[in-house]
Amino acid sequence: MTVTHARPPRLTAPDPAVLSRVEAAVPGIARTRASDRLGMAHDASHYLLTPEAVLVPESAGQVAALLRTGLPLTFRSGGTSLSGQGVSEHLLVDTRRHFRDIEVLDGGARVRVQPGAVLRQVNARLAPYGRKLGPDPASESACTIGGVVANNSSGMTCGTHANTYRMLESMTLVLASGTVVDTGAPDADERLRALEPELAEGLLRLRDRVRGNPDSVRRVQAQFSLKNTMGYGLNSFLDHDSPAQILAHLVIGSEGTLGFVAEAVLRTVPAHPLAATGLLVFPSLGRAMAAMPELVAAEPAAVELLDAESLRVAQADPKADDVLRSMEVAGHAALLIEWQESDAGVLAGRERAAEEVFGALELAAPARLSRDAGGRAALWHIRKGLYAAVAGARPSGTTALLEDVAVPVPALADLCEELNALFAKHRYERSVVFGHAKDGNLHFMLNERFATDLERYADFTEDLVTAVLERGGTLKAEHGTGRVMAPFVRRQYGDELYEVMREVKRLCDPAGTLNPGVVLTDTDDAHLRDLKNVVTVEPEVDRCVECGYCEPVCPSRDLTTTPRQRIVLRRELAAAREAGDRALARALEADYGYDAVDTCAVDGMCATACPVGINTGDLTKRLRAERHGRAARAGWNGAAKHWDGVTRAMNLALDTAAAVPPALAEGASRAARAVTSAEAVPRWSRDLPRGGKPRLPVPAAAPDAVYLPSCLNTMFAPADGGPGVMAAVRRLAERAGVTLRVPEGVAGLCCGTPWSSKGYADGQRTMGERVREALREATDGGRLPVITDAASCTEGFHRLGLEAAGVRVVDAVAYAAEHLLPRLTVTRRLPSLALHPTCSSTQLGLDAAINLIAEAVAEEVVVPQGWQCCAFAGDRGLLHPELTASATRAEAAAVRAGKHAAHASVNRTCELGLTRATGEPYHHLLELLDRCTGSA
């Protein structure tokens, strides 16, 4: 078939009449800048539509007011959906920003949640009760409850018995008319009949229509015995009797086309703490599928399929063991299998039964189950790393598509073979097939260039639809119908059930204003329209698949932009330049400086969440470097050569500011920032400490370690008049009988972070050379470890490449946990401690050491809800205090509500940021250890 579509302009002016109606309904919530609209035009799908405006309501009441305008609306939260249901050319409603409440009910048996709450955060709140939500999609670190409900999410272990549909108890629903219905209220049916009589009566009429048609009953039961997110959940008419419950369950999986879910009450399932995991490798896919009945009879929690191409990709995974690496993969297939239990004895019984089953299977490699956390994590890393490996290695300029289907389990092997034949027929390379074998649910990946290969994609889709439906399957198992499969709903369900779905839509949304074009469509080629063409921009961002996994960990997400938005705006800027749209390019450039560069904390947390390992901080550093002129570069390079004098000058400036009336110092800093820029002059405020203490060398003839105190000790005085971490480390070492050497010239040494974070590469190299030379001598050629007392500095020293010079740098917390704490006696403990791990400590893997020391000094240790990077980020918190205020808002609220005896972190600037946010003095954790192990 020949497919061509004219491409509309990427950005057109919003309709003033539309914006006027929005403003009249809910003032001040519309975002209409080009960067706001284009930044939210992208989600994890392969569709791209630019909204007229992005709306940011704060309550269900405001959403109801928007719905009453009759304007087309699309609700968007996490933006991790894959089928095009989260993008719109109309008004895009951001429900992530202000709908994040989580309330645990009945000791964790139920939870009340709003649509902007991230699934992982909900499970973190349930963890103390030994519970979790049933749905466990791979995107759980980033997807929100809004998407979990709208897409009827399931996942690797929940099957159809614990998906969102099954776990729903009730919801607060805002209908297209603006009517608000709580389906859990005792009078929910009466209220629905009173406020929406046509809807209530129509649902009962459709219930009877479906139940009265034996063919409809048979089709619905067959379709929903599978994982199935295709069309509307017509099983609601068989499973429920009352209009309120039918409506609530129809809304599950409706992708925002029937109403807005302002709140949901979900039942929970046990979170089993014990698990045994193994990888079974079979000589063929047929052998793997033949083993399924016996394996499923052993009641595993998860059975994940990897086809031959998946195994080839997995062999390159750094976590792969020698058996997998050395295998010559031909037509092999593997099943990753796991049992989960809460009782060790029960799990042991599962393992014995599994070993008996394994012994009767024809395997291509020995099989064994492991409870070891590292071994289990390695196996799951292989399974979950398939997406990253294939998507990250795709050619620049291509779009990664992750699709899913489901068929009855007996047809699974046949469909896998058919899919591989289709990949060959349509010339798709490195297309892996994997999925939830226990549920007959397959996922597969394609890399596509829509600008040149649209006809190929169209032909492949037609063949796929035929292959799945011929086997009694569903075209969408988990990812939602969206736009990608909307043209095929009638083909899957037949005319009668399709007309029932049409009537459901008409009853709930008579004007068709809720997420137009999604789930149901009259456009046969809707799946081929508005496809995303990815332009080649730069190495730091070209691998990005726009999945959004980075967004929940980004500290600037509620202030300006997220890592995904930083990347897509670079792509939009490149596209505008390529198209010769100078006006758009100028508008994007004007906003990008502050929104994306100035307010990026370069904390690297995005890289910990990104499936393809992108650190947008690297991009930010390069962009900052491009701003610098020759004089600035020379000045910062000079600072690296005279760092002692620079830090003393900063110390003196803080002392001077503290000595004059606060209003005078604050006014002077405001004036200096106005004359220069907010990027050049820090903003002084009266909550900042005085200057610190100079770092002095301490010679030692036979030291156990070299201590290199952070220069933050010189710049900032200790918290609350305390001794500070520099004194604490020395006292703890002395108390433990450990001798420390502080190197000569210590006052002029630094980890290099001030240069690297600002993009001054020359200055970082200059400092790196000085540090390597000094530490090679101080460590006796690398014989002694170096310890430093700020986590960000530890990370900075690692970036200087000291290990290549034979110098090993260890964070003081890790050193204290291993070498000092065992020799110390805790003489008193704090009743409670609010602990703030830092982004650097997280990336350095210091959590275990931090927890060990924290639990030694406090009876109760709490990492407050809402914890994330504080975004103080060296001097970011001084240059842009609004960034830290935004990043710490949720954590600060939790701290203020907690009334803890002490507050601690492992980095002085983070302590400053949290002190400013909470009003509570934060100390370095080692200061508290010093206090608790000193003489009474």
Image: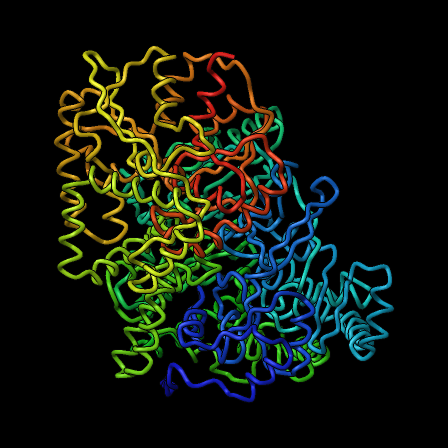
Q: Which x, y percent locates residue 427? A: 30, 68
Residue 279 appears in which quarter of the rendering? top left
- What residue lies at 42% left-to-right and 14% top-to-bottom? 822
- What residue lies at 32% left-to-right and 56% top-to-bottom? 616
- In this picture the colour scheme is rainbow
- Front residue of this view, candidates 91 and 497: 91
875 over 785 or under it: above or below: below
Q: Can see residue 418? A: no
Residue 179 appears in which quarter of the rendering? bottom right
Q: Which x, y percent locates residue 868? A: 47, 46
- What residue lies at 67% left-to-right and 58% top-to-bottom? 165
In this figure, what is the number of numbered marks? 0
- Front residue of this view, candidates 529 and 357: 529
- Compared across the picture, whether 768 is left or right of 505 comes to left
Q: Which x, y percent locates residue 82? A: 47, 64
107 over 189 or under it: above or below: above
Q: Which x, y percent locates residue 560? A: 43, 63
- Front residue of this view, candidates 12 and 648: 648
Q: Can see residue 467? A: yes
- Front residue of this view, candidates 695 and 453: 695
656 over 214 or under it: above or below: above
- Quadrant location, the N terminus: bottom left
539 over 285 or under it: above or below: below
